[in-house]
Image (tube, helix red, strand yellow):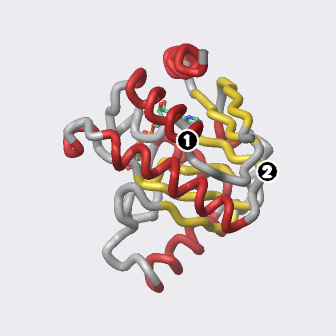
Amino acid sequence: MTTITLVQGDITRESVDAIVNAANSSLLGGGGVDGAVHRRGGPAILAECRRLRASHYGKGLPTGRAVATTAGDLDARWVIHTVGPVYQESGGDPALLASCYRESLRVADELGARTVAFPAISTGVYRWPMDDAARIAVETVRHTPTAVEEVRFVLFDDRAYEAFSRRLG
Ligand code: AR6
């Protein structure tokens, strides 16, 4: 059984086996969670992202996929980078957003991660409506078979925290 927990705060302060990054397909960093992960995690993460690009993802990591790197200076063993869908481009189809959570858990299982922290993927720059994103996130985690023991949603502000709380019941 996977326990789902909620905390409000900065995901880069969490102590877990794996921190999920809301990346973009370039894997070269950006704002929001991505910016914070690279800032606090240090240059080792970007160096590994560059190597992954060169070896596997020359055209970018596709939306809905996930890939792991070192966590650098973060208090975690791995960062799992996933690329959320842009709301407008996806037409609100939940499939790719659900895929981010599923694929991240699959990568976590491959790594042997038992505790995984997720941000509210796609709800910032990519503008997915928070309530809908919370529904997709919670339902997908509940229905994905995994050896991960704790999925911790780390929500940045009150609005996100409340949306996920309502969904978790
Ligand atoms: N800890 C936890 N949550 C955070 C943090 C943090 N440190 N910072 C922001 N959030 P976003 P996206 C929340 O924009 O929508 C980047 O430029 C934020 O309030 O980080 O998937 C990438 O490079 C929001 O609720 O990710 C991509 O280009 C949620 O995390 C693009 O943004 C996600 O916001 C990805 O956009």
Residue drawn at (34%, 32%) of the image: 128
Q: What residue is rendered at 65% in x and 39% in y?
A: 11
Tell me if mark 1 has few (under 14), some (14-19) or many (20+) residues whose alpha carbon lies within 10 angstroms of its own.
Answer: few
Which residue appears farthest toward the bottom when viewing the image? 55
Query: Percent from the top left, x then y, of residue 34?
Result: 51, 49
Q: Could you say whether the residue bearing mark 1 is in a helix, strand or loop?
A: helix
Which residue matches tag 1?
143
Q: Residues within 10 Å of mark 2 (few under 14, many from 20)?
A: some
Q: Quadrant of the C terminus?
A: top right
Q: Which circle marks residue 91 in the picture?
A: none
Whether residue 147 sits left or right of residue 38 in the image: it is right
Kind of residue at badge 2: Asp
In the rendered structure, which disc, 2 or 1, sits on the residue that comes first in sequence? 2
Corner quadrant of residue 142: top right
Q: Residue tagged by mark 2?
A: 75
Three-letter amino acid code at disc 1? His
Name the quadrant containing residue 70.
bottom right
Q: How far is disc 2 from disc 1 in space, using C-alphas?
A: 28 Å
Comparing 135 with 71, the one in front is 135
Q: Nearer the viewer, residue 153 or 75?
A: 153
Q: At numbered mark 2, what does the secondary structure look like: helix, strand or loop?
A: loop
Ligand 1 closer than 8 Å to the CB at disc 1? no
Q: Is residue 36 above or below residue 124?
A: below
Give how far across and how far down residue 67 sits, in percent.
54, 66
Q: With respect to residue 132, does 107 lie above or below?
A: below
